[in-house]
Image (spheres, rainbow, N blue to C red):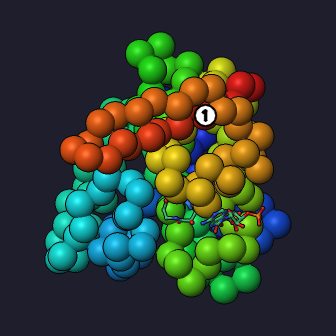
Amino acid sequence: MDNRQVCGGELITPRLRLTPLSKDNRSLIFALRSDPRVIMHTGISQYMKVDEADAYIQRIEQEKQDDTCFVWVINLYSTMDQVGTICFWNYSADKKSAEIGYDLLPAYWGQGYAPEAIKAVLTFGFNRYGFDSVFAYPSEANAASCRVLEKAGFQLLEKSITKNGENDYISRTYRIIK
Ligand SMILES: CC(C)(COP(=O)(O)OP(=O)(O)OC[C@H]1O[C@@H](n2cnc3c(N)ncnc32)[C@H](O)[C@@H]1OP(=O)(O)O)[C@@H](O)C(=O)NCCC(=O)NCCS
């Protein structure tokens, strides 16, 4: 079995338990991806049916087998409430870098859960996956996400502006090196 799959199990932090995404998480995925507050800055199309969550989980399982993506569910350690997800995806061809993504249900925002989960998966990504660097590309308008990355130690590399009709879309490139 591939080394990444052997390593790709649970991660524990003081308040969180990160578990590999599975079919049991369809309600969480639907709750996240059907909520306009969660997807607002992500470019994800709003889910209308829970079947879409099933299709997503199936796709992620295939991508995990292909070693192109890994998604954890963020659970509260105390209650095992499923509160969000965090992932590595968009690996470079040499598998030395990846993009990080994350989302939480709004009821759990503002309690530092995202930075806690990010730090755990970064340690794992650098020490077990062998990444040299991890990137993130939040919209500049997504102040919470930019702040979370900065709190987790990412550095802002650049901003890029895309014309979107009358409006400019500004995205930021953040990177953290091992
Ligand atoms: C981004 C997200 C994961 C943050 O998670 P979180 O666990 O709530 O993060 P934190 O508890 O560390 O709080 C966010 C930080 O951003 C700050 N923040 C939040 N909204 C803000 C705003 N509108 N302007 C400025 N700062 C803001 C908070 O004050 C806090 O910083 P602080 O600890 O210095 O006070 C969460 O908001 C979320 O799931 N958003 C929807 C999905 C998403 O956008 N994912 C990222 C795609 S790139």
**Can see residue 88?**
no
Which residue is found at the position 71% from the left and 25% from the top? 177
- Quarter in which the C terminus is drawn: top right
Count of labels in the image: 1
Q: Amino acid at mark 1?
A: Tyr
Residue 34 located left or right of residue 98:
left
Direction front: furthest residue:
166
Q: Position of residue 139 (x, y in %)?
A: 47, 47
Q: Residue at x 46, y 39 (%)?
A: 171
Disc 1 secondary structure class: strand
User: Quarter containing ligand 1?
Assistant: bottom right
Q: Is residue 78 above or below residue 99?
A: below
* Ligand 1 has an atom within 8 Å of the beta carbon of the residue at disc 1: no
Question: x and y percent of residue 54 in the render?
Answer: 24, 66
135 and 11: which is toward the camera: 135
* Residue at (23, 60) in percent of width and height: 45
In the image, is residue 65 above or below residue 149? above
Residue 113 as seen in the image, left or right of residue 174: right
Q: Is residue 44 above or below residue 74?
A: above
Please name the residue that numbered disc 1 is placed on: 174
**Residue, x 38% and y 64% (percent of image)?**
40
Image spot of residue 119 (x, y percent):
73, 48
Mark 1 surroundings within 10 Å by alpha-carbon count, few (fewer than 14), some (14 through 19), many (20 or more): many
Foreground residue, 7 or 76? 76
Furthest toward the right, the residue is: 14
Report whether residue 173 is seen.
Answer: yes
Q: Quadrant of residue 27?
A: bottom left
| Looking at the image, residue 152 lies above or below residue 83 | above
